[in-house]
Amino acid sequence: MSQKLVDRSPDLKRLRDEGFELQVVGTHLVLKSVPYVNGNKEVKRGTLVSTLEFAQNDLKKPDEHTVSFAGERPCDKNGTPLAIIHSEERKTPATGVDVNFLFSTKPRDGKGYPDYYAKMTTYAKILMHEAQAIEAGVTACVFPVIPTDSEDESPFNYYDTSSSRAGIDALSPKLAMAKIAIVGLGGTGSYVLDFVAKTPVREIHLFDDDEFSQHNAFRCPGALGIEELKPEMKKVQYYSALYSKLRNGVVPHSYRIDIANMDELRQMQFVFLCLDSGELKDPIMRTLEDANIPFIDVGMGLQIRDAALSGILRATTSTPRKRDHVRDNHRVSFAPALGPNDYSRNIQVAELNAFNAALAVVKWKKLCSFYHDLTQEHHTTYVLDTGKMGREDF
């Protein structure tokens, strides 16, 4: 990804052609081997780091005038700290990129930097000017050997600038599993997909044999036009096509997971179970337990009471560390669906589907150490009537 972006960006290509040692890491530009002076008036080499701003996958003008720096405290030729130092704080803005200073200097015209060449060379020249006063001829233009790019490992069709803006580029790789599965693409399952599709999981396998019907449009992410409601269109086909706009690796399986094919789940690293009926949950769970695969089962029970809906949302986690609670504490119902109920009749509860999915995906991210997990509960509930959150099975 690094050299491909450099090749099609005039300002980055100019930096490379002039001999600067640069690299694109996620959505950050890293400029290495920049000479500077430390507090002992010694010439050292440090690294400048800038966020990159994208428009339709190509670079646009920098929004921010600041850059980060990795190295000792940069000084002038006399050992006095430079005025461009805004703050000192250790951070990891991207995977393998650690910085400890923030620099700030704005162009005098007040219009901001016109491109990344102007921005990065401005900061590099400030540092080099002091270094050259001590060691004549020292430069950041080192003309490094440029290796060819390895195959791009990102599943996305364009750059994840959301993570870089939030400063969590270095955390996102924790979610980069090879294969996960979502069994059941009803209301909750579709929101699980919506959340997980925006993570760097390589393959997301969808299992469901149902057709996408008109009522599904009222409890799934996004909005469908009437022309998109095609007869006999499978849910997994619809969702695979929809999310292919964002990423690759969404793999549709237009059949149910049952006794005959549940061994397909053994190749997954994680499974979300989003099934309305419980008769297949026990053999599916036993297959996953035997294969040492963690999973989360979601569900909600809603009733009409006093002319309003009430009920409970649930996300039950099973990991190799703890599994006995699922059956011993009766956390999951293994009973078959008995027919129409309040939930199936009152389908416009998209916010509850989304909330139920969020409970599951947040827990999955905790298991991946993306979020802190101090209690490590394996059963989470939300009571609709009272707004009370429950945590059990630690």
Image: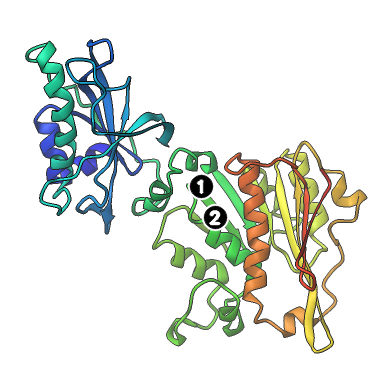
Inspect this view and state whether residue 119 appears: yes
- 126 w.r.t. 162: above or below: above
Residue depicted at x 61% and y 83%: 215
The span from disc 1 to disc 2 (Cα, nearest Å) is 8 Å
Q: Amino acid at mark 1?
A: Val
Q: Which callout, 1 or 2, points at the residue further toward the start of the chain?
A: 2
**Residue ID for mark 2:** 196
Bin the neighbour count of mark 2 within 10 Å (Cα to Cα): few under 14, some 14-19, many 20 and up: many
Residue 206 point in image, percent of width and height: 58, 59
**Residue ID for mark 1:** 201
Describe residue 142's horizontal placement relative to residue 332 as left or right. left
- 305 w.r.t. 312: above or below: below
Describe residue 390's horizontal placement relative to residue 266 as left or right. right
Residue 212 point in image, percent of width and height: 57, 77
Residue depicted at x 57% and y 73%: 220
In the structure shown, which secondary structural element does the residue marked by tag 2 occupy?
helix
Residue 137 point in image, percent of width and height: 7, 15
Indicate the quadrant where residue 38 lies. Answer: top left
Q: Quadrant of the N terminus?
A: top left
Can you name the residue that lies furthest to the right here? 328
Indicate the quadrant where residue 315 lies. Answer: bottom right
- 355 w.r.t. 107: above or below: below
